[in-house]
Image: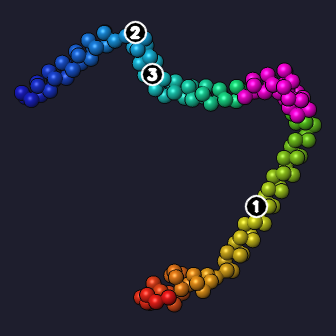
Amino acid sequence: MDSDLTVVSLLDAELKDQAIAAQREDPAARAWRRLGAALRRPELARAGTIVAAAIFPVTLVALWQLVAEREWVSPLILPPPALVAQTLRELWGDGTIQTNLAVSAARVARGFGTGAAAGLVLGTSSRPSSPCTRSTSWPGSRSSSWSSGSTSR
């Protein structure tokens, strides 16, 4: 019981010291500490992440608009974002984009399939060369320097 009372009194003293330090603390520092604690709450942390993730694309589009508006780069090279969005809407509406995306996806799938099949055939049909079988142990190889215990090369 005595040790329990000692622990409780130590905790009370520590809490009292923290309360006194908090009262002496600079109001701006206290506000920043409270803001940090609030932002660590899960729902606010998620919102902060979303805002932070949106800053880069928004800044990029604003810079794009500024460059296009001031014509620092030719409009033939870098058209304004509004024109790009309008063209995207038109092409989506008449189905041109969907058709082109389907053709591109088919090309990617065909290329991947061809490469994977060629790699599989070449990989399974090749055997380790004789220098490899002398220096390392391959499954199924009988004459290996590791399995025979020989140290000569």
Extent of the magenta region: 60-87
The residue located at (57%, 81%) in the rendering is 132
Is residue 30 found left or right of 70 in the rendered image? left
Residue in the foreground of this view, choosing between 51 and 103: 51
- Dot 2 corresponds to which residue? 27
Q: What residue type is labelled 1?
A: Phe
- Quickly name the residue at label 1: 112
Mark nearer the N terminus (1 vs 3) = 3
In whole angstroms, how far apart are the C-alphas of marks 2 and 1? Answer: 61 Å
Decide which of tag 2 and tag 1 comes sooner along the chain: 2
Q: In which quarter of the image is residue 9?
A: top left
State the CA–CA distance, disc 2 to disc 3: 14 Å
Tell whether position 94 is magenta. no
Mark 2 or 3: in front is 2
**Is residue 11 among the parts visible in the rendering?**
yes
Report helix, strand or loop for mark 1.
Answer: helix
Given this view, does label 2 or label 1 mark the residue nearer the observer? 2
Q: Is residue 83 magenta?
A: yes
What's the CA distance linking mark 1 and mark 3?
A: 48 Å
Q: Which amino acid does label 3 sit on?
A: Gly
The numbered mark, 2 or 3, whose residue comes first in the sequence reads: 2
Q: Which residue is disc 3 drawn over?
A: 36
Q: Pinpoint residue 55: horizontal percent, then vertical percent.
A: 65, 26
In the structure shown, which secondary structural element does the residue marked by tag 2 occupy?
A: helix
Q: In this view, does 131 lie above or below 107?
A: below
Is residue 66 or residue 124 the one in the foreground?
Answer: 66
37 vs 133: above or below: above
Quadrant of the image occupied by residue 114: bottom right
Colouring scheme applied when the structure was drawn? rainbow
